[in-house]
Image (spheres, rainbow, N blue to C red):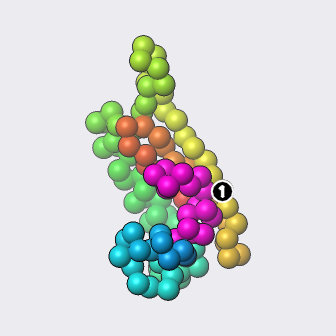
Amino acid sequence: MRFFGLTSLLSLDREARKKQFKKLFGSKRKIVASDSTLKRVLSWLSRKMAIVFLLGFLKVFEKEGISRKKLTQEGPYRRIGIVDGSFMGSNYLVTLNLSGKIDYPAMVE
């Protein structure tokens, strides 16, 4: 999303439907992905299972020091969270992304 300057999941969904965007990934499918498709395909995944999966990586990232970021050269390391929300296809979506040396979606509801 950052590479293309997209700032929300809704803008990503719009771009993913365009012919030029799909061509970058070699896709010939009519629709690459949509929120309703993801909801249908992952309907077996309980909320608890998703939380356990997402947070399962966090301890490793914290141990390796890659879940934090310095805002200035001399400043302390900070934990930065970016929250985004959208309403797509009768579904509400809220995401908390931790921004560090890597970006990590810590919560999706």
Would you place residue 102 above or below residue 52 in this image? above
Q: Residue at x 56, y 55 (%)?
A: 6
Q: Is residue 108 left or right of residue 102?
A: right
Q: Residues within 10 Å of mark 1 (few under 14, many from 20)?
A: some
Q: Nearer the viewer, residue 29 or 55?
A: 29
Percent position (x, y) of residue 20?
48, 72
Percent position (x, y) of residue 58?
38, 46
Label 1 SS: strand
Percent position (x, y) of residue 89?
68, 76
Q: Nearer the viewer, residue 64 or 87?
A: 87
Q: Nearer the viewer, residue 34 or 4?
A: 4
Residue most toward the front? Answer: 20
How many marks do you count on the picture? 1
Type of amino acid under label 1: Gly
What residue sits right under mark 1 in the picture?
A: 85
Q: Which stretch is magenta?
A: 1-16
Would you place residue 63 above or below residue 13 in this image? above
Q: Determine if the magenta segment contains residue 7.
A: yes
Quarter placement of the C terminus = bottom right
Q: Residue at x 39, y 79 (%)?
A: 27
Q: Is residue 63 visible?
A: yes
Q: Determine if the magenta segment contains residue 50.
A: no
Q: Is residue 45 visible?
A: no
Residue most toward the top? Answer: 74
Q: Residue at x 47, y 59 (%)?
A: 51
Q: Nearer the viewer, residue 15 or 70?
A: 15
Would you place residue 51 above or below residue 35 in this image? above
Percent position (x, y) of residue 79?
49, 33
Image quadrant of residue 93?
bottom right
Q: Residue at x 41, y 84 (%)?
A: 28
Q: Is residue 13 left or right of residue 64?
A: right
